[in-house]
Amino acid sequence: MPSNKKTSSPAENENQLLLREAKKIATALGKMFAPSCEVVLHDLTHPEHAIIAMENPLSGRQIGDPATEMGLARIQDDQFPDVVQNYENHFPDGRPAKSTSIGLRNSQGEFVAALCMNLDISLFNTMQQVLNQLTAVNNHEAPLNESLKSWKLDDIKTEINHYAATLNTQPRALTSQQRQKLIRHLSDQGMLQLRGAATTAADTLGISRVSIYNALKGQ
């Protein structure tokens, strides 16, 4: 007695295998980027109820819903790009999305499936605005340049030696103009507010403490 069971063609078997493997990828990607990325797998061989797998349904769509415009375009045009990446999109409620659509072909070059990812970037935009506000500075509101470092007397010697080295000379060989510029720099950095700072600077430069004070008065 002949069997009524319908056998699948090799092409149909290949398509089913491709869809089966693509489901694994869709599930893994959805779980990896949950909850901010919707991952949808479309069966383009049945566009009227194309969605066969979905993770994080941010668009409100469901299993069995039809293919999108891009899915239909792939079905109608075998020259359609295999990958359309990082394009601007929107969810039904208006939230901005960043989308990527990957067309999957069988061995005959026919589009069988489309794996689509829709990233909700509204949250990231809000986070970016908060970060921009938190990191924004307004130097015009500060009467001076403040350093949060706790200076030590040895730092004064190091700064003086470094300044002299940039001029290929020694601290005691600096010109009057160079010394005055250096002393103003030390003052701006808050170094000369330390107890004993004037003495340390004067000894390192080979000048008197009075010369340090006179340089500060001349600012």
Image: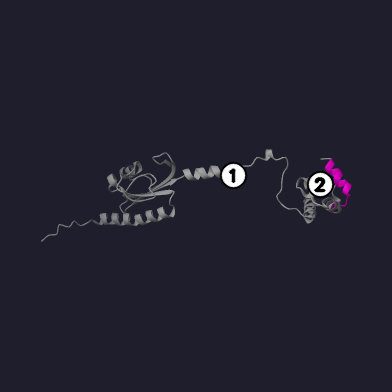
Q: Nearer the viewer, residue 56 or 160?
A: 56
- Write down the region rendered in magenta: 204-217
Residue at 77% in and 52% down: 159
Residue at 86% in and 53% down: 203
Task: State yes or no: residue 206 in magenta.
Answer: yes
The tag on residue 134 is 1
Check disc 2 and report its element: helix, strand or loop: helix
Check the picture and name the quadrant holding the C terminus.
top right
The tag on residue 183 is 2
The tag on residue 47 is none
Q: Nearer the viewer, residue 167 or 141?
A: 141
Residue at 40% in and 53% down: 30
- Frontmost of labels 1 and 2 is 1
Q: Looking at the image, tell me whether mark 1 or mark 2 is earlier in sequence order.
A: 1
Q: CA distance from mark 1 to mark 2?
A: 35 Å
Check disc 1 and report its element: helix, strand or loop: helix
Give the image location of residue 105, x and y in percent. Answer: 33, 51
Give the image location of residue 17, x and y in percent. Answer: 30, 57
- Answer left or right for 213 relative to 136: right
125 is higher (above) or lower (below) than 107: above
Residue at 32% in and 43% down: 72
Check the picture and name the quadrant holding the N terminus.
bottom left
* Three-letter code, disc 1: Leu
Q: Number of marks in the image?
A: 2
Give the image location of residue 47, x and y in percent. Answer: 29, 45
